[in-house]
Amino acid sequence: MRAADGVAAGGVGPYHPGSNPGDYQFTFPFNTPGFDFFGTGGFADASNWGSTVTPFVLTSTSQFRPGAPYGASSNAAAVLTPTYTSDFNEVKALGCAGCAARSAEQTEIALFWMENSPTGWNRIARIVAEQRNLDALDVARLFATLQMGEFDAYTASLEAKYYYNFWRPVSAVALAESDGNPLTSTAAGWEVLAFPTPPVPDYPSAHSTAGGAGAAIIEALVPGRGQAIATTSGSLSGVTRTFSSVAAAAEENALSRIYIGYHFRHATQVGVAQGRAVGNYVAQHALRPLDHD
């Protein structure tokens, strides 16, 4: 069924950055000759994924495409909005490698949620399944639906990312003096907490979309409020974090992308909302139980 789904091609192709403030730019080291595979000046990952890959459950990759960044008519207009200004100054203060304003817990959150999202949400699903004593059939359905949902969440996010092509914080800070916004300013040597910035546009945050989808699917397939969730991370060993619900875990997962310097707050909030829309749709339409007389 998946033989012609487009995944084998990888969704990679030449990418040409825009020239206006707010437009995505190749980020270091992906703007160096070693990554210039297509002669365009750099590398942007999965630039064709959203237009060439078939989702598992969604009717199209654009089914849950969010509105434009900051509700603006263009990226250049987006960077002039008050919300962008607030988001810019927040990630500039909290997301860099040497940011003194970031607390020890915020640093822990950033590194804890760095790991691959499907891995982390599979772990949370296992915890919930064990807590609630699900039978084998329900566990199998949960995991299969969750992984299809994670795939579709990433695919939907990538479609939106390359539809809007909004720049990453590392580019925004470096180019702040020429963005037309008098309330933003550059910072010499600003770099993300965990180098490098992933080579895809900012909006929406795919990590946040994956978290929103994961939480929505677990909530739908394991209804009712369970006990608190204590989970670990493959990217920060020896640390356990506890959450009152899978929704709370998804919200912290989104915040982590600000603290690590990868995303503006708006991209994380919209990502969670997009992910929840994807997750709810997948839960309602995939692997539905058969009716028996």
Image: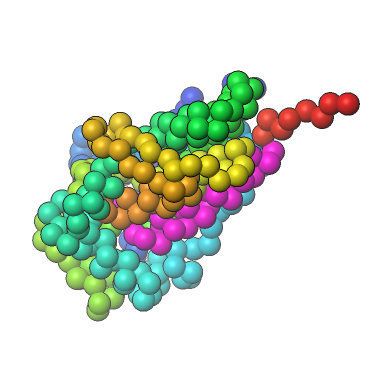
Quadrant including the N terminus: top right
Q: Is residue 286 magenta?
A: no
Q: Is residue 151 left or right of residue 84?
A: right
Which corner quadrant of the image does residue 47 belong to? top left
Q: Quadrant of residue 143?
A: top right
Q: Position of residue 133 (x, y in %)?
A: 56, 28
Comparing 243 with 266, the one in front is 243
- Does 261 sit above or below residue 136? below
- Please identify the dominant SS of the magenta region: helix
Q: Is residue 138 visible?
A: yes
The C terminus: image quadrant: top right
Instruction: Report the residue that reaches farthest toward the right.
Output: 293
In x, y percent, where is residue 212?
Answer: 49, 47
Q: Nearer the viewer, residue 161 or 17?
A: 161
Residue at (31, 71) in percent of width and height = 86
Q: Is residue 271 magenta?
A: yes
Instruction: Give the side of residue 265 with respect to residue 279, left or right.
Output: left
**Residue at screen point 37% across, 51% down:** 252
